[in-house]
């Protein structure tokens, strides 16, 4: 996975297919308790678009001039699959800590994937790398919380606890982004020690 610009697209395609498949089930079986009131109709449209956004922009910018960072694309897509799978298995309603874990883990995966795509580990000076990674992750966490509020919280049963939950989710997401930064730095140092300038994260 260090070769972020590898040519294997199968992982990203499998993640996208598994996510869309579960979204279809959730949308058309919305009477099941784990799917009820969670705006899966909107997710069926928004999730695939968000999953494809980074690859589409990357290919539009580079137009085949360099190998695609499929490992990064796959990591960016994984949080959507993990989220939908958690709902399919009813983990959000049956495991108390599942939502908190996912806000940390998914933001770690998302930020790590974006870091590989954007080659954040090469950014200088170091403070700019930290701002780009952790600050970008915090901004994305904020946008996600706004999306959650708009789609189902404002008219749902969770409005009374939304403020505290949103603050906690923001902290967990930002922490996950900070861990992703540490992983990117470690990967960059590992590659540097190998002395392989053509294999950079």
Image: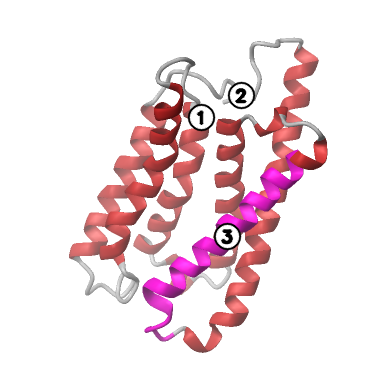
Q: Earlier in the sequence, mark 3 or mark 1?
A: 1
Relative to 133, residue 68 above or below:
above
Q: Residue furthest left?
A: 28
Q: Which residue is mark 3?
A: 141
Tell which of 1 and 49 is nearer to you: 49
Residue shown at the point (58%, 76%) measured from the top left = 165
On whether residue 143 falls in the magenta region, the answer is yes
Can you tell which mark lies on residue 139?
Answer: none
Disc 1, disc 2: CB below 8 Å? yes
Tell which of 16 and 122 is nearer to you: 122
Q: Which residue is mark 2?
A: 2
Residue shown at the point (28%, 48%) measured from the top left = 20
How dense is the environment of label 3, judged by Cα within 10 Å: few (below 14), some, or many (20 and up)? many
Counting from the top left corner in percent of width and height, residue 139 is at 60, 57
Q: Which residue is mark 1?
A: 71
Residue 120 found in image quarter? top right
Secondary structure at badge 2 equals: loop
Q: Residue furthest front?
A: 61
Question: Magenta stretch?
Answer: 129-157
Residue 65 located left or right of residue 129: left
């Amino acid at each position: 996975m260090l070769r972020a610009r590898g040519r294997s697209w199968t992982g990203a395609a499998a993640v996208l297919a598994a996510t869309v498949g579960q979204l279809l089930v959730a949308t058309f079986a919305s009477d099941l308790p784990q799917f009820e009131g969670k705006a899966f109709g909107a997710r069926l449209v928004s999730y695939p678009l968000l999953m494809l956004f980074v690859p589409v922009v990357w290919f539009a910018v580079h137009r085949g001039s360099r190998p695609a960072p499929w490992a990064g694309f796959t990591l960016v897509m994984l949080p959507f699959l993990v989220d939908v799978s958690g709902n399919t298995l009813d983990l959000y309603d049956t495991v108390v800590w599942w939502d908190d874990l996912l806000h940390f883990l998914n933001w770690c995966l998302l930020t790590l994937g974006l870091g590989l795509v954007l080659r954040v580990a090469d950014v200088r000076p170091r403070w700019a790398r930290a701002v780009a990674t952790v600050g970008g992750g915090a901004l994305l966490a904020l946008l996600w919380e706004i999306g959650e509020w708009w789609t189902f919280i404002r008219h749902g049963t969770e409005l009374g606890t939304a403020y505290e939950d949103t603050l906690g989710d923001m902290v967990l997401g930002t922490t996950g982004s900070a861990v992703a930064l540490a992983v990117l730095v470690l990967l960059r140092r590992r590659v540097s020690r190998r002395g392989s300038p053509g294999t950079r994260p």
